[in-house]
Amino acid sequence: MKKHNFRRALIATIAAISITAVFSVKPVHADTVNTDPQVQATNYQMKIHLNTRKNKLTEKVTIDVANNSQNTLHQLLVRNIAAGVLKYDNQHRSKKNKNLKTTVTSITDENNKKLNFKEADQQSSIYVNLPQDLKPGEKTKVTINVITDVPYRADRFGYQPVMGGKVYNLSFCFPYLSDYRNNHWLFHPYSDEGENRNSAVTNYHVSFYAPKSYTVAASGDHTTNKAGKTTIEAKQMRDLAIVCSNRFKVSHAQADGIKINNFYFASKNGAKYNQLAKQCAVDSFHLFNKQFGKYPYKQLDMTEAVFEPSAGGMEYPGLIMISDEGFLGKKPKYYELIQDVSHEIAHQWFFGTLGTDEYTEPWLDEGMAEYFEDFDYNNHDSKSIRMVRNELLKTSNKKVRKALKKTSIKTNIKLSKETLDKVAKYSMKKRHYINYAMNEFPKNSGGEGIVDYEMAPIFYNALRYYMGEKKFYAAMKDYCQTYQFKQPTGRDFLNMIKKYDDSAKVQKVIDNFIDPQYLR
Ligand SMILES: [Zn+2]
């Protein structure tokens, strides 16, 4: 996710360094996990109907399950995370939402025989009793039928009115098999603030039905026929999102052979939004493909989103939701738009291809996406950076224009490399740990907003400075390629850094930011 309220100027960033943490949380020890889960969902066959009159999803999800563990399983754990989202919405967004619910209507085996199941964790966990034991090495199929309300919410799961039509963001609403490793089901509660995903890559085969006036964007490759049926093939992806609107226009661009499909609204500023969002995607792919190894999918869909002001975007493999950033109204935010796009494209690696656990180690996915957007994309001369600069020179007040004229395009519109080097040195003056899970942030740490969006980028900046750029980027590329489509941990990342630089000064950077008690 890209958050806005935490965006700060450099001074505030440096001030954040001095925040002292109170370590009142008991340490958690976990084994290193860097392999595929022991019980795996190898395929999902999904039939999803969207009723735009009732704002309801009817889903039939068949999961192919392979037991690669040494244990005999009597039960499977299917997660219906929509229950967590709707519980939050019922509590916090009830005005426009009346008694939202998600109901599992039936679960069947491969012979269409009904299976017993028990719901737990406020309906978000569904323990399915298998008709017979699933022994090590065996495979099975289960089918879950579920009906889920779509909330009225400007968020990643919800619908909103737009330009006399509607837009549906559909994610965090599809049932999935829980991760299973170290001989137990490993799952996290829904987090409205951040993310809770920890799934392995799988293959989605989806038929999605919406009224034929709707244009559909989705993870993976997809086509929509005249009757409104969209066929989606999303291979080697660890999550799926579908977005549709009866007001979308679609525009395309290419970067290094990757097709970029931008789904946007034809508002007064729509053409400018489209042009800038596409250019930023092209520039981000050019930069990140070179740094991390090429994005492995054929295309990326970007969808203009009506989001609450605190959110700038949301990442899924092959699809990113990007806030309209005022372009639907009178005050387009040019700079924010390129920050959202470059951040979510960085997530195509840091969460997309590298499936680090978003809940237990947000410093990896959020921290890296923020670092490579804010300290890296921003520091490269590109067409999109220049487009924003020109717009700001035309539209900003005198003070901002004067400041902009002072900086050269070749550095950036925000921080110069010289300043970043200063930040790196300054950040070593005090210890400030970043490797906390979503439920472990010490009091006064500022939570995810400070720790993962502000402090974690400062850690990566310190690594860059003390390793030198050559070693730092070589380590990043090796990390991305070694763990592509896998689920690395913080320990795996640090081992990769040490492979390229095991000097005392780099160890000091690690000691400064990483609390060994919390390292996974
Ligand atoms: Zn993010």
Image (tube, helix red, strand yellow):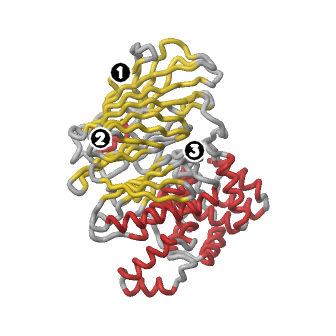
**Quarter of the view holding residue 360:** top right
Residue 266, percent across and down?
29, 61
Q: Earlier in the sequence, mark 3 or mark 2?
A: 2
Picture residue at 46% right of the left edge, 60% below the top: 341
Whether the residues at callouts 3 and 2 have beta carbons within 8 Å, the answer is: no
Q: Confirm if mark 3 falls within 8 A of ligand 1.
A: no
Q: Secondary structure at mark 1?
A: strand
Residue 318, percent across and down?
49, 48
Residue corresponding to mark 1: 106
Give the numbered dot on residue 2: none
Q: Is residue 505 above or below residue 76?
A: below
Give the numbered dot on residue 355: 3
- How far apart, in angstroms, are the residues tagged by discs 3 and 1? 31 Å
Nearer the observer, 160 or 27: 160
Q: Is residue 164 left or right of residue 518?
A: left
Q: Earlier in the sequence, mark 1 or mark 2?
A: 1
Give the numbered dot on residue 150: 2
In the picture, the quarter occupied by the C terminus is: top right
Q: Secondary structure at mark 3?
A: loop
- How far apart, in angstroms, are the residues tagged by discs 3 and 2? 27 Å
Is residue 444 in sight in this rendering?
Answer: no
Picture residue at 48% right of the left edge, 73% below the top: 9
The amino acid on which the numbered mark 3 sits, given as a three-letter code, is Gly
The amino acid on which the numbered mark 1 sits, given as a three-letter code, is Ser
The amino acid on which the numbered mark 2 sits, given as a three-letter code, is Val
* Name of the residue lying farthest toward the front: 226
